Image (cartoon, rainbow, N blue to C red):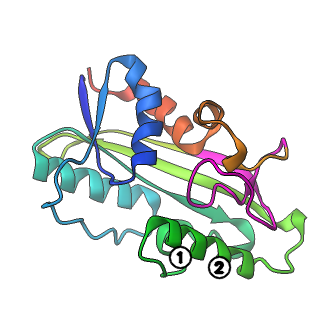
Amino acid sequence: MQKLTIATSNPHKVEEISAVLGPLGIDCVALGRTDIPEPDEDGVTFEENARIKAVAYARALGETVLADDSGLEVDALGGAPGVQSARYAGLGATREERDAANNAKLLAALAGVPDARRAARFVCVLTIARPDGTIVAESRGTFEGVIGHVPRGANGFGYDPLLVLPDGRTSAELTSEEKNARSHRGNALRLIVPKLPR
């Protein structure tokens, strides 16, 4: 496999994926077309949504595609926001506005919840599909921590400023190299490498 189209418009995801797969000689490219309608991600699990995206884009592009579905699970909220992580607050025209609204809603939902009950994790499920829609590889990675009380850090995106890791830093306070070595997406990528079609 020399080229892999990443089914996302999020440049941060493409960078994270390229950092792991690029050294293996795989050219990771973002979706270059905007005329393909986004498939309805109506699955109830990360796995279902990743499969929906991978198959839809692989068939539409006629290329091998890697899709991911990822989000945050908070134990005290019964696993929410889960598959709704990107749309949790339902507000914001830009990615930055949505991230800020989602983080504010999460902090409000956890107001008064003690630290001992704020366990959470990022989850990333990766699926690779061929142009005919055949799924050829899947993996699931997690990144454990607790939800902090205030956002900290300028790196990353989404809920990164709120996930406090065992070393006391948030995900947004890690360097790109540290995050790739430890994150849910990094873990999922390392797990999918042995399954990549040759």
Q: Are marks 2 and 1 in contact (CB under 8 Å)?
A: yes
Q: How many marks?
A: 2
Q: Which residue does the numbered mark 1 point to in the structure image?
A: 88
Position above or below: 152 against 20: below
Residue 129 place in picture, x, y as percent: 24, 43
Q: Quadrant of residue 37?
A: bottom left
Q: Which mark is residue 181?
A: none
Q: Is residue 114 magenta?
A: no
Q: Which residue does the numbered mark 2 point to in the structure image?
A: 105
Position above or below: 36 against 5: below
Give the residue displayed 53% in from the left and 76% down from the top.
88
Which one is in front, 173 or 74?
A: 173
Q: Which of pointers 2 and 1 lies earlier in the amino acid sequence?
A: 1
Which one is in front, 29 or 78?
A: 29
Q: Report the amino acid beneath label 1.
A: Tyr
Q: Is residue 105 left or right of residue 44?
A: right
Residue 190 place in picture, x, y as percent: 50, 29
Q: Quadrant of residue 183?
A: top right
Q: Report the amino acid beneath label 2.
A: Lys
Give the residue displayed 24% in from the left and 48% down from the top.
31
Q: Is residue 154 magenta?
A: yes
Q: Quadrant of residue 146?
A: bottom right
Give the residue displayed 54% in from the left and 60% down from the top.
71
Residue 131 place in picture, x, y as percent: 13, 42
| Majority secondary structure of magenta residues | loop
**Segment tinted magenta in the rendering:** 142-167
